[in-house]
Image (cartoon, grey):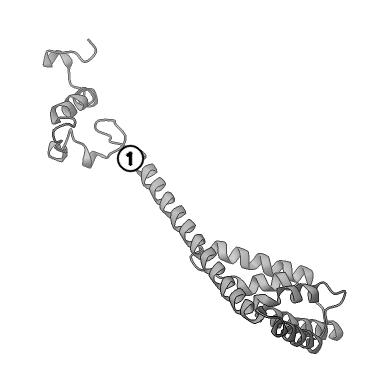
Amino acid sequence: VFEVKRAINNLCQEDMEFNMFFGKFRSLWAELEMLRPATRDAAILDERREQDKVFALLMALNPAYNDLIKHILRADKLPVLDEVCAQIQKEQGSLGLFGGKGGELVMANKAERVSKAATTERGNQAEQQATANKSRYFKSGERSSLFCNHCKISGHTREKCYVLHPHLRPTFTSGQYKRRDLRDRWAPRAQTAIGENPERTGTSHWS
């Protein structure tokens, strides 16, 4: 129960798409409801309220108390809040008695914050990369779905057809394909598309 409640407490949307975030949210609550079925038993409800207080306190402790938290959670029966507080105070005294432990507590807390920040940053970068890849894929697919009903060639529409609109044809610099090459490459297809008679032009595309 503690781990599920901590996951719910730490759940954050950040850059996650809402439907995915809400799916995780509902999944965690469903797991919690499975571990804690609905009841009207007053004794069980009182016990759960006491457990929730203990869980909330343990989740707020510094990372230096992680060993103590594990020890408390492994007990056959979860201690009440007063007993947990007594164990924490005892552990705090032990940390203060041994040299360097006080500094380790601060450093452990700082290290965990840095680790969480780094994990969040990596998640953000991965999400941005996935979005960029999806965007590139969409644009590529969008272009491949275009079709010109004039020259019967895919990749553009009638409004962008170089055969109908020669002024839209790009000018190539030295070292690239010349405009004439581009014209020659398009001319046979254009003749076929518009039904031009090869005999009238003096040359045959199929010869």
Dividing the image into 4 quarters, which one contains the N terminus?
bottom right
Residue 40, image x and y in percent?
83, 82
For mark 1, give the secondary structure.
loop
Residue 28 or 67: which is nearer the viewer?
A: 67
Image vertical order of residue 84 relative to residue 31, above or below: below
Image vertical order of residue 98 relative to residue 183, above or below: below
Image vertical order of residue 2 relative to residue 160, above or below: below
Crowdedness near tag 1: few (<14), some (14–19) or many (≥20) residues, C-alpha within 10 Å: some
Going 46% across and 53% down the picture, which residue do you hit?
130
- Where on the picture, by quarter, is residue 158? top left
Residue 152 or 9: which is nearer the viewer?
A: 9
- Where on the picture, by quarter, is residue 7? bottom right
Going 48% across and 62% down the picture, which residue do you hit?
124
Residue 172 or 64: which is nearer the viewer?
A: 64
Dividing the image into 4 quarters, which one contains the C terminus?
top left
Q: Amino acid at mark 1?
A: Leu
Q: Which residue is mark 1?
A: 146
Residue 194 or 61: which is nearer the viewer?
A: 61
Q: Is residue 182 rendered to the left or right of residue 36?
A: left
- Farthest top residue in view: 207
Residue 63, image x and y in percent?
65, 75
Going 24% across and 25% down the picture, which residue do you hit?
189
Residue 23, image x and y in percent?
61, 63
- Farthest front residue in view: 99
Total of numbered circles in the picture? 1
Image vertical order of residue 148 relative to residue 72, above or below: above
Q: Is residue 183 rendered to the left or right of residue 42?
A: left
- Where on the picture, by quarter, is residue 38? bottom right
